[in-house]
Amino acid sequence: MAYRSDRVAVTDRARNALRELIEQHGPILLYLSHDDAGEPAPRWLPIRDFRAAEGDTLFGRLAWHTELWMSAQAYTRFECDHLTVDVPADAGPVPDGGEQPAEPAVFLLRTRRLSAAESAALAARKRGRG
């Protein structure tokens, strides 16, 4: 059973893409760097290639023990949001044995603001750690 954070979820399409990447490349993680332009799109990379920089934050864990990390700037942007990791509907394997895309998976984030109750629970957890 995968760990589920109350701040991040994963769709079935994204869960399947994570599984395929792990089968091909071994353990991976998703990383969201600071990017003001466009939709937030975390990139995947093998765990062995990741070195957390100062301020990087583990936002949550997804299916298959995959972690979602983000830069300090990205965390500031999504600090009060719930995130859902998804894969565009037109991404993934091409039907009828067509050529695979160069990038095996493109992830995107869907966001929603935390409710007042969720925000209060998050603040209480932060106070408990401090």
Image: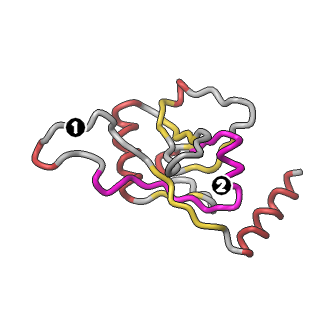
Mark 2, residue position: 78
Q: Is residue 71 above or below residue 4?
A: above
- In which image quadrant can residue 112 be found? bottom right
Mark 1, residue position: 100
Residue for point 56% across, 43% down: 67
Q: Which three-letter amino acid code belongs to the residue tagged 2?
A: Phe
Residue for point 70% across, 61% down: 80
* Outermost residue toward the left in this view: 96
Q: Is residue 124 above or below residue 130?
A: below
Report the front residue among 73 and 48.
Answer: 73
Give the magenta-colored segment's residue range. 68-90
Residue 66, x across and y down, in percent:
52, 43
**Residue 1 visible, this orientation:** no
The tag earlier along the polypeptide, 1 or 2, is: 2
- In which image quadrant can residue 123 be found? bottom right
SS of the residue at dot 1?
Answer: loop
Residue 40, x across and y down, in percent:
52, 49
SS of the residue at dot 2?
Answer: helix
Q: Is residue 128 magenta?
A: no
Residue 5, x across and y down, in percent:
61, 58
Q: Is residue 70 magenta?
A: yes
Q: Which three-letter amino acid code belongs to the residue tagged 1?
A: Gln
The colour mode here is: secondary structure
Report the front residue among 1 and 121.
Answer: 121
* Outermost residue toward the front in this view: 37
Q: Is residue 114 above or below residue 97?
A: below
